[in-house]
């Protein structure tokens, strides 16, 4: 009987350890491509390329969860932006993803205003790419469950920069040990939480939550700030000064976004 119990306990321990390691190894990656435009002509060229060429080609090659968003302030901002979110399961797929994107650039027919643009009439002012890995606390990128008018929905993209790598790791740990659970309990409808592993502003982390509208967004953050668990967590000495700069960007999904 003792031998049976020992073997059962050993098997249970190995299974649990394997599940934990599997969860760690199952953290998805995410590329965020940001297209900067100077005017509505460039925005239109980017939009057509993304909708008519990039997304269909990605879908055909197994990348079917692409999110496409415009900055909410595109009507008035000097720097107008499209954001494309490309989740994938492993770094081995990154080369494939880049190859798929290159394939669309060779297509001079489907979105010629973009792929065939002249040097003195480019379809964007600049383009940047950010590579992230999802947190252990939420290892998969998820589609949002927000409802209602698409023009009213608000996706909030946040970037938290830290003064040092150690402080950055501290903030990531804070998310994994409590903040993610708090956001989930309060109904923030997160799309992802990710650690930036390649980008222009490092060290930093980024995450995106979603809301039915701006009023819902404001109400949720009010609840967050007043939550007793958040007040206790944020007051702990070990979590002080782990964020040096916060950048908030409000986004609205396109009609063809999958996130």
Image (cartoon, rainbow, N blue to C red):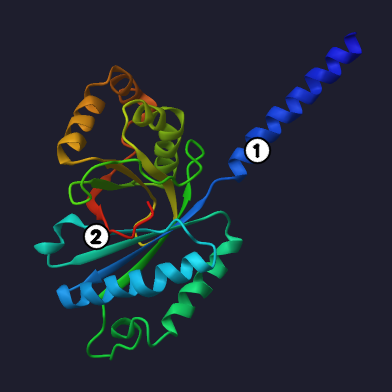
Question: Is 81 displayed left or right of 50 in the figure?
Answer: left
- Residue occupying image coordinates x 69% and y 28%: 16
- Front position in the image: 87 or 161: 87
* Residue 170: x %, y % from top left: 43, 36
In this view, the residue farthest toward the left is 76
The answer to which image quadrant residue 54 occupies is: bottom left
Seen in the picture, residue 119 relative to 30 is either above or below; the reply is below
Work out whether residue 246 can be spotted: no
Q: How many marks?
A: 2
Reading the chain from its start, which is encountered first: label 2 or label 1? Answer: 1
Q: Which residue is mark 1?
A: 21
- Give left or right: position of 40 versus 105: left
The answer to whether residue 79 shows anywhere in this view is: yes
Image: 141 above or below 228: below
Residue 173 occupies quadrant:
top left
Real-space Cα separation, disc 2 to disc 1, in angstroms:
37 Å
Q: Is residue 247 left or right of residue 170?
A: left
**Quadrant of the frame with the N terminus:** top right
Question: Which residue is painted at 36% across and 40% down in the image?
Answer: 190
């Amino acid at each position: 009987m003792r031998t049976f119990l020992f073997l059962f306990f050993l098997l249970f321990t190995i299974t649990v350890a394997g599940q934990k390691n599997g969860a760690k190894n199952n953290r998805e990656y995410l590329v965020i491509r940001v297209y900067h435009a100077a005017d509505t002509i460039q925005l239109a060229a980017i939009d057509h390329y993304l909708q008519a060429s990039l997304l269909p080609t990605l879908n055909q090659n197994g990348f079917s969860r692409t999110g496409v968003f415009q900055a909410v302030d595109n009507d008035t901002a000097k720097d107008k932006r499209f954001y494309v979110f490309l989740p994938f399961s492993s770094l081995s797929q990154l080369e494939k993803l880049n190859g798929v994107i290159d394939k669309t650039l060779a297509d001079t027919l489907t979105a010629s205003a973009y792929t065939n643009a002249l040097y003195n009439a480019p379809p964007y002012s600049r383009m940047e790419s950010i590579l992230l890995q999802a947190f252990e606390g939420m290892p998969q990128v998820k589609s949002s469950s927000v409802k209602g008018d698409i023009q009213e929905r608000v996706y909030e993209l946040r970037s938290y920069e830290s003064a040092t790598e150690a402080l950055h790791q501290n903030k990531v740990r804070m998310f994994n040990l409590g903040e993610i659970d708090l956001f989930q309990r309060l109904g923030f409808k997160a799309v992802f939480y990710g650690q930036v592993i390649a980008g222009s502003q490092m060290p930093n982390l980024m995450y995106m939550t979603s809301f039915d509208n701006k009023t819902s967004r404001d109400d949720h953050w009010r609840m967050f700030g007043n939550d007793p668990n958040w007040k206790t967590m944020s007051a702990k000495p070990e979590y002080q000064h782990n964020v040096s700069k916060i950048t908030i960007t409000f986004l609205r999904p396109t009609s063809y976004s999958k996130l």
